Amino acid sequence: MALPKDAQADRPTPGALEPAGDERRLAGSPHAVAANAAVLALTRAARSFTLYDPANKVVRALIADFRDRFRAVLDGFGPLVLDVHPFELALGREVVYLERDRERSLAFRLFRDGVRRLAFAADASWEELLRLLQILSIRYTGVRQQEDDLVTLLRKADFEKIQVSAIEGFVPEEEQQEGRLDGDLPRGSPARYDPPPQWDLPLPPFPEATPLRYRAVAPELLERLRAEEGEDQVPRHALRAVGELLQSAGGEDLQAVLAFALEVREYLLVEQRSDLLLELVSLVRSALAGEAASAFLETWLDARTLRALVSTLGPDEAEVPPPLALLLDATPESTLDRLIDLLAEEGDGPRAPLLRRLVVRGCRHNPGAIATRRHGATGAEAAALLRLLAEVDPAKALHAALEATTADDPLTQREALRILEGAAFGPEIARGFLHLLESGHEPVRLAALPVMAARGGPRVFPALRSHVEKHVARLSAAEAEAAGQALVQASPRAAVETFGEWLRPRGGGLSGKLGKVTASPVVQRAALAGLRAVGAPEAAALVALLAEHGDAVLRPEARAALASMPRGGPRG
Amino acid sequence: MGEPRAAGPADDLSLAQDALARALGRARVGEDRALANQVRELGERLAHLLSGLLRMTRLHSPENAAFNKPVEDLQATLVQLHGLLGSVHLVAVEDQVYVNNIRIRSGDKASSMRELGAELRRHNVGGITFHVPLDGPAIRALVGALGGAPAAAEPRNGLVRTLHAAGVAGLELAGRFRFRMAGERATETADPRDVLARALAATDEAFQNLAAGRAPNPLPLRRLVAEILERDLSAEELWAEPPGEAPRYAVHQLRVAELALLVGRALGLPESVLQDLGVAALYHDCGYAAGASAPEGAGVSFEGHGAGGARLMLRQRGFHEAKTRRVLAVLQHHRDANERLRPGLFGRILRVAEDYDTLARRSGKLSPTVALALMLKWAGTRYDTVLLQILINALGAYPPGSLLKLPDGRIVRSAAPARGPDTFAQPVARCLRLADGSPAPPETPLVDLRGVAPLQLLRTLP
């Protein structure tokens, strides 16, 4: 779960974690120096979570440093016993840590919260050191828990090899003892409320007694009982609590229980127990009816929860399991919106096909949703939506694709091209291809050329030719070649004639009479690419012309093409 | 989300990062950040306003119009804090100020916090508890009294009298505090009866706050449970009769907590779970607090208090495993062990502890020994067999409070839970009557009943 800070920060803010001011490296005996290094590493690692996401590589490096420094001091010098003073940590008489800035100081935080000594056994395990780091990190990030403070957390950790001496932070000083007053200052508190005197009474009858005896309890029975409260049982307890509360709730209490259900959801998300999320929502839905259930689900099935639920499906899963399907269908509009968001996020990732299937499925309830979402969408999202529309409503998709051919967005245009490619050719489609040919993005033009030629054939030849002649000044080599090949694909005969006109213009002047090629290198390249594909004797002649008199850069290519051209009748 | 890590098998560091991320995530879902921020801001405002008002008394009388706005602000702050927390505890320790255990960040106003502490110390005062929000005149009287010269002898008591004479009610003055020095140990200096007194006060305050419609604040109770767990659970002082003026409800909650912790410890529950059990026990009958807002005379029924109490626990926002355990425990603590909807472990422990305390102590009709013996008949039905036996093993044949007549005629009261299997029926006891029937002097040492037989069980003192 990302923490609310600059997640882009990949490098430490200068000085943020480095020892500053008092929190400096202190000199002393080798043991003290090593202890100082270890404590500084602990402080830096614990504070790092105020700056970085736990998954950040900086955090990883600091955790590694903490581990290594502590191992070094414990392995090298044995047990480490640190006395905690208001701003210092001391190893015997040597100060191994000093920091007076209360916000930064590890010593102050420990001392203020009642810790007076930390003693690490030489064989303190990494697990225990990590647990200590967890506790201190929570305190450093300023999470104010209502259940725990530092001392209760340290006691709960039940360390075996780390001893924590901790007591009440402050105690009565009473240098000047004063006598007890007769008649206290009235507290004036609002009227007390006490339960009725006979609360919990009467008990049920107990007519018979059995003599008391000591009986040892078998260890396995104790173990079985302890297991009921194992940490792994907490998610189940949470679900049970929700279920039983729902059974007993009514009226205004219901809102409190539903709020608790949302809290349990948060917990399950943190613990990555997506498997229990469905169970949780089923419990609630079975207790609610109609509007109440829908209203709850709208809140419950947010983007994170949906992501977690979808993650339980395999990428190739064809059918949505019924419990999840029911849930997705219960709040169709918002769920569809969120699924589209997930799909946009996924892009071409491995789960994209699954997400598309889920969206298409969701569109059954709301066919117009995709079209609505398309308004204002750009880039990958727009392309994804266009593709989705094609699966949901092909007619609308074609219309949308034709519109998209003029969008100044390469991804959308590529998707539009894909859709046009599958459509029956006609004047509208031809216009669409033309628009793509006019795209400001070369990759789009390169992709459109062969498709246009293949689908339009001779009908689009004039447009293809015009494309080359009009844009000769800006065509790249790749586009020129693609255009040449497209011309041949559209109409080989017309292509060869065109190449001939380009390479041997009538009235070509002296150069023409001398057999020189006056066409621009771009045109020559387009022609060469096209002629390579044709292979007819007329083509060979033109290739030979290029090999002899073409642009210097192209002559070797032309010669190579000539050498590989088959001798024989025209192809295509 | 964080940046993606390099692909490959998870190593120790990756696992550590995951574990830390989860721990932080869990901590955050358990936080009620809105409440925490609100309490912190209001606490800071309270401390700064009070400090400012005290500074102003050097120049003006509290009746001066210059005090109008800050007094109004202080009153409003107290009202808001009281609404959230109930009693507001302001404590000045050395150069630090805390409001309900939240340290006030002084920032660039560090001097004002030092001054506040200094002003209080002049009167030998270390803290002020506002049980109710003071009104304007009371605030002026408080500020005027604090700003005035301290009494020559017993300045704090003098201040109390001054405030009382001015009609100020609803606050309590505490003596001075200091940070406990490194090397001091709690168990050497604190009387177990002090722990009990604090536990009773905290339990009572917790109930009153629920009755007043506030959210539960389990941390003070958890601290006390942690402190009790650090002690010897079989210490006599933990089982002695509390002072008569202690609220009966609080006594019952605390005694059930002690019994539950005895069982939990014998079970070998880890420290974190024991803490949760103790806190759940201190809240277990809280459902009756909902009666404060019920229509006149309606109250909360026995049948309804479990579910009602569980719902009161939900006022505390944020998910925490302790809260979940507490909700279930409060909901289930009267359920029979063999019910179809079997209660969880905490519910079963509390049922045993609760019924025992009610039978043995609250009813006033039965000896603790007989109470246990009656309960034993219901092992396997009302009560979890193993848990009940654990309680019996822990308390012994003559649980604390059992009256016994010794062969020599002395009358004693069992003082502590059983020391072990060998002394199951031979507790240590406090002598009440000497052999001649006269009351035993208070300084009479505990009697070890090992080897003393026969023991005659009495129901009341003759």
Image (spheres, coloured by chain):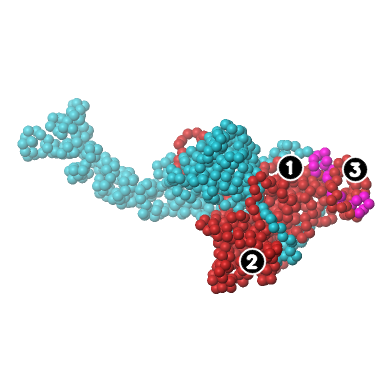
Residue position marked by numbered label 1 in the rendering: B266
The answer to which image quadrant residue A186 occupies is bottom right
Which sits in the foreground, A257 or A177?
A177
> Within 10 angstroms of label 1, few (less than 14), some, or many (20 or more) residues?
some
Question: Which callout, 3 or 1, points to the residue nearer the camera?
Answer: 3
Colour that chain B carries in the picture: red
Image quadrant where one finds the C terminus of chain A: top left
Palette colour of chain A: cyan
Q: Chain of mark 1?
A: B
Residue at the front extreme? B152
Depth-wise, is mark 2 or mark 1 nearer the camera? 2
Task: Please say if A37 is above or below A337.
Answer: above
- Please state which amino acid type lies under the numbered disc 1: Ala
Residue in the image at 62% along x and 71% along y: B137
Q: CA distance from mark 3 to mark 1?
A: 28 Å
Task: Give me the residue at 41% from left, 47% from top.
Answer: A344
Mark nearer the N terminus (2 vs 3): 2
Q: Is residue B42 magenta?
A: no
Q: Which residues are magenta?
A: B418-438
Gap between marks 2 and 3 measured at Cα: 66 Å
Q: Residue at x 66, y 45 (%)?
A: B183
* Distance between mark 2 and mark 1 Cα atoms: 56 Å
In screen coordinates, is B304 left or right of A24? right
* Residue carrying label 2: B149
- Residue B453 marker: 3
Q: Amino acid at mark 3?
A: Ala
Task: Evaluate whether residue A119 shows in this view.
Answer: yes
Res A482 quadrant in image: top left
